[in-house]
Image (cartoon, coloured by chain):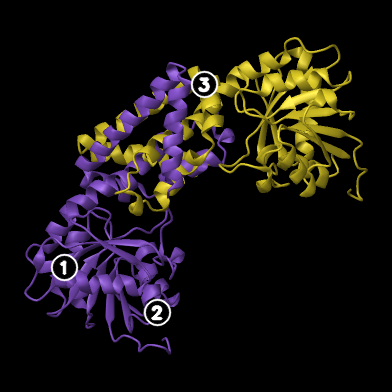
Chain colours: A yellow, B purple
Amino acid sequence: MSTSEPASDRVLAIVGVGLLGGSIAAAAKQRGVARHVIGIGRNVERLQAAVDAGIIDDFATDPAQSDAEWDLGIIATPVDRIADDVHRLAKASRPGTLITDVGSVKETVCYASSLGLPEGIHFVGSHPLAGSEKNGFEFADADLLQDRVTIVTPLNDSQIEAADEVTAFWKSLGSIVHRMDVATHDRILATTSHLPHVTAAALARLLTDELRPFAATGFRDTTRVASGDSDLWTAILLTNADAAASSLDAFSRQLDEFREAIRNRDGERLKTLLQLAKTSRDAL
Amino acid sequence: MSTSEPASDRVLAIVGVGLLGGSIAAAAKQRGVARHVIGIGRNVERLQAAVDAGIIDDFATDPAQSDAEWDLGIIATPVDRIADDVHRLAKASRPGTLITDVGSVKETVCYASSLGLPEGIHFVGSHPLAGSEKNGFEFADADLLQDRVTIVTPLNDSQIEAADEVTAFWKSLGSIVHRMDVATHDRILATTSHLPHVTAAALARLLTDELRPFAATGFRDTTRVASGDSDLWTAILLTNADAAASSLDAFSRQLDEFREAIRNRDGERLKTLLQLAKTSRDAL
């Protein structure tokens, strides 16, 4: 509890206490943004370990069987499970409860999560651009969202109030919040996140045993995200298949320009392409 | 000077006192592998600054005009200048002098550097797999080569003695030395180093102003090397154009497999591809 501002009375329910769910729990407790954090998951031993580690205060495996009540529910499970988990949590929530998620794909997830909710339960989608190729609450970091962008994606005017409330929540964890529609989100993230995962994986597949000793820092940096969980990334890429395929096409066209300049020994053209790339990367 | 072993009497001439040349100078001095290090370059102010920073002991802009003598010359200039610099240094060297380089491409560089050397001057190619997207001796690090691989590439039996000598030199700076022929080097590095540079640059070119705020750590890691110097990389890619183009072709075939699985919503296939990539990357 901070001495400079009153601690919140808010009770959080976090479904999926992994790296991101655990980091949100730790941040909310450390910043006095929540009075109590309930972790919801499938594995009792893992949940108990998260309690023992001080990441969450209490846990449940089935929200319907829990006596607890919560004001804000955060679904931090893989994208192909989010909508089911929203509805499962919604059924066990009292009227007035707000639910959001942290999924990397928003269009299908937000529509499936918003449709058919019980009276008085509100959902709006979120996507904190923070994570790691690591998994598990052991890697939770209360500062993971500090100065990182979170995108909030209301589907229509009926979700504006919910969007304002989750925006305030993410800001209270130190995040910078942008608001956009779900299709824009999915198109942008296809290029900034889903595409780099595929290029890293395609590169990593070329690394034979003969080549491995000669992969230095450049190769390591460029392929780091390929160590991410393959189930999670299969779900993300399939849930955003059209936008991901489009970004792959745009990438292939860029690659063709480089290949042509290299094949033609066109030094002027190649240098221009590399300079444009450097300028773009340096602006990050 | 170490108290446990006698300091070497060796005098080093380093042509090109940048990040890598400066790191070699700093490492050789710190480990007592050289008694004296002469920097050779074009810019007197930069060379004087490197002396003031304690990276080198003395400098010359033209080795032919220098009174100094050296036992080992290291050419740390861009790949398209190495052969000229080898011959320029060789002309000013006394018989028995050994010259090596640090270039990222070996076949054309080693043939051009070895042909027509003065009697008694020996050359053998080297490539320390260490560097950075940063430039300048200000980023020099005496531990840059520690536990990093250096590849030594004798062209034939006449360069074996020189290869043994430079192998001992790189090892004395903490490096792990592998020996291979120039064509193998260029084929391997095309995939482990030159290809990742092109994929990073192609990705960076897709980063429009609209997308830039939403590029998180995954995109940053994957594109980091695209900040490298465009002149240097133009020279590297053109000097190794055939192998680089072949590695781009192999990469495109991998990319097509991912694209097809995504387009066809083939979750089993996509997951298998991602798992194979993860296994390969995790083995690094």
**Residue linked to disc 3:** A238
> On the image, numbered disc 1 is attached to which residue?
B123
Residue A271 drawn at (x, y percent): 31, 41
Q: First in sequence, mark 2 or 1: give its number.
A: 2
Residue at position x 40%, y 76% from top?
B51
Q: Are marks 3 and 2 on the same chain?
A: no
Badge 3 density bin: few <14, some 14–19, many ≥20, Cα 10 Å: many
Q: Residues within 10 Å of mark 1 (few under 14, many from 20)?
A: many
Label 2 in the same subunit as label 1 = yes
User: Is the residue under label 1 in contact with that under label 2 (CB below 8 Å)?
Assistant: no
Q: Is residue B93 left or right of residue A144?
A: left
Mark 2 sits on what residue? B31
Circle 1: element type = strand
Q: Chain of mark 2?
A: B
Give amino acid for label 3. Leu
Label 1 vs label 3: CA separation?
54 Å
Q: Amino acid at mark 1?
A: Phe
Nearer the viewer's eye, disc 3 or disc 2?
Answer: 3
